Structure formats: structure tokens, C-alpha cells
Amino acid sequence: MSRAGTVDTDILTATLAQNAPPPDSVLLNRLNPSTLGWAAVAIAILALLFLLGPILTPFFLAGIIAYICQPLVAALERRRVPRVLGVILVMLLITAIVGLLILIVLPLFIKEILLLTKEVPNWLEKLNTTIAPWINQRFGTAIRLDPASIRDAITEALQTSEGLGMKLLASLRMGGMGLLGLFTNLILVPVVLFFLLRDWPILVSRLDQLIPRPLRPRVTEFLREADEALGQYLHGQILVIVAMCAFYTIGLRIAGLEFWLPIGILTGMLVFVPYVGAATGFVLATLAALMQFDEFSRVIWVWVVFGSGQALEGNFVTPKLVGERIGLHPIAVIFALLAFGQLFGFAGLLIALPASAVLLVALRKLRDAYLASDVYQGTK
């Protein structure tokens, strides 16, 4: 063999060796103790969050509220309002909104419950004169409801000293720790919210300093996209809730439903859970309409309100205010609520949808990386 042939063989061998996959020993060396250590730290943090889930509720709730209100505080600061004063003004605004909502809805709920105790026996009497005879004739039974006894039982449960009041007091005594936890959360949420809003730029700067410098461009890009998607989702959902609360309350008021305000507000506030909020409001409104109206056509108008609300919310309000680009599939929303609720309790319900919006951005990144990879394109 000539010298030239030997050189060509050596070059070919070196090229094949260079392009060959690394041996197992090289791959194992990449998993150095430092990498394994950080992976163990990450797993430990996730396990700690899982174990501390029951007490994380006020912190998660304050974090979500702070994230939503941060742009408003920043806008006030740009107008030369001191940040601490801006935080106080925003928190006073939140307190006023929540207090006004409670003052409007709570008395009406109490009033409607009292009216409900009076209307249930009348509704049962209607069943005795309409549906019960048909059932008895068809199936050979002798069904008859006793409205007077039911009225007396409900009245006793609501008004007597041995009724609902004593039962509530007994449950509060048995669940004293739960009551203490409730008051603790009510105190912790505004305290944590104040410090988060006040120190938000400092916290963001410190988190930025912890990002490894080689990974900083990609991590910063991902966080920017996640922040955009999450902000659009959360702010859009708030606008959707406000819009649908207004629609359902006005629609039920026009339909003449006596329970229009509490049912409309409840339905609008639950609209972030696809179909569940509308189904809950539909059932409550239907029961209220059947007890209130003598003509079935009035009940149909209540159904028209909910049908129109579903069509409006699904085809216009949510796509317009939230955006189809980050819209989560209804099945994904329900699964996220159930999964996070199972893992972290009530705190999980608070972070389920925001975490799902961020996860959606991560899945898009993985999909783009997969579509650009040699495995998908088959170049190797």
C-alpha cells in the first residue's frame, strides 16, 4: 500500500472516531457530582413544597395578587408616587373592592336563604299537584310530599337555638384550629402582599443574579415569554370574570329572577372553570325559577340567558380578552385544577391555572426544539 493510501486511511479513521457517539464513560462524566447535587436540591425543594402545601395558601394567594397588582404599583411609581405609598393605595383599593362585594352580596344571600325556606314548601306543593299524580298513576305508587313538615324543619333549623346556629357553633368549637388558621391567613395575606409589592424590583433583581451566566439569555427569554403569557392570561381572566358577572346579573334581572344578583355573581366568578361555573349557575337559577314562576315560559327565558352567556363567553369574550394563543383547553384546565388541588390542597387551586399557563410556554419551547432536532428531521 502506498504512503498516500495510508494517509487517507488515517484521515478516515480519525473522522469516524470524531463523529462517533461518546462512550458510556464520557456520558457518565458529564453527570458530575455538582450536577447531581443540584438535581438533588431541586427534588428536595419540590418535596418540601409538597409537604408544606397546606400552609402555603396565604403566600401563593399573596403572590398571585402581587403579580396582578404590580403593574399598577409600577404605573404609580412612574408618576413619581413613592412606592410605599403606591402599595398602600393599591391595597386600599383591593380592600374597598372586596368589602363592597361582601356588603352587596352577603345581605342578599341571607335574604334569599330566608325566602328559599318559604318557597320550598310551595314548590313541593306544586310537585304534589302536578308531577306526583303522574308518577303515582304510571308506577302504581302513593308518593306525596308534606310541605308543612318540611317548612317546620327548615324554620327550626334556621331560627331556633337548637338549630343551625348551635350546629355552627359546635362545628366552630370542633374546628377551632381550622378557624385559627382562617384568621391567620386573613392576617398573613395582606402582610405578605405588602412586602411583595414593596420589594418586587429587589426580589426580581436577586432572582436574576442566581441565574447561571451561560444560561441567562435562554432563561431570560423563557421568563419573558412566560411573563407575557401569564400576565395576559391572569389579567384577561379578571376582565372575563367582570364581564360575565355583569352579563349574568343583568340578564337574570331582565328575566325577572328574584335571585339574580347572587346567582349572577357566583356564575361569573366561576367562569374560569370551563362549563363548571355555567353548570352551577344554571342549576341554581333553574331551581330558583321553578320555585318563583308559575309559567314555564319564564324558566325558558332564564335558560336563554345562560345559553347566550355560554355562547358569548366562548366565542367572543374569552378569545378577545384572554387570547387564543394562550387559551388552555377545557380538559387541561379541569385536569390542572384537580391535579394541583390533590397535590397542594387549596393552595394548589390558586396556582393551578397560572402554573398551567407557564407550563404551556415550556411545552411550546420543547415542541420547537423537537421539530428542529435531527431526530424529527431525520438528518442523522
Image (cartoon, rainbow, N blue to C red):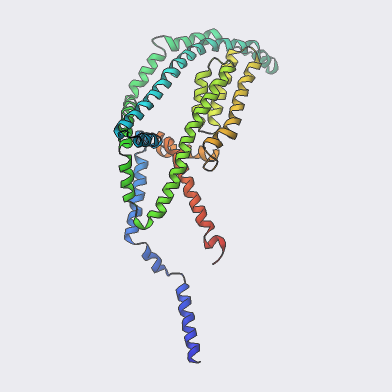
- Left or right of residue 126, residue 39 in this image: left
Front residue of 196/157: it is 196
- Left or right of residue 258, residue 28 in this image: left
Q: Farthest residue in the right direction?
A: 138
Q: How many marks?
A: 0
Report x, y in % for residue 42.
35, 50
Q: Farthest residue in the bottom direction?
A: 2
Q: Can you say whether 316 is above or below 15 in the image?
A: above
Q: Can you say whether 137 is above or below 213 in the image?
A: above
Front residue of 85/32: it is 85
Report x, y in % for residue 82.
30, 34
Report x, y in % for residue 46.
37, 46
- Left or right of residue 6, residue 141 in this image: right
Q: Can you say whether 148 is above or below 186 in the image?
A: above
Task: Determine the residue positioned at 30% across, 43% down.
Answer: 202
Task: Determine the residue positioned at 33% across, 21% down.
Answer: 173
Residue 339 seen in the figure: no
Residue 213 seen in the figure: yes
Query: Quadrant location of residue 129?
Result: top right
Report x, y in % for residue 219.
40, 52
Quadrant of the image containing the C terminus: bottom right
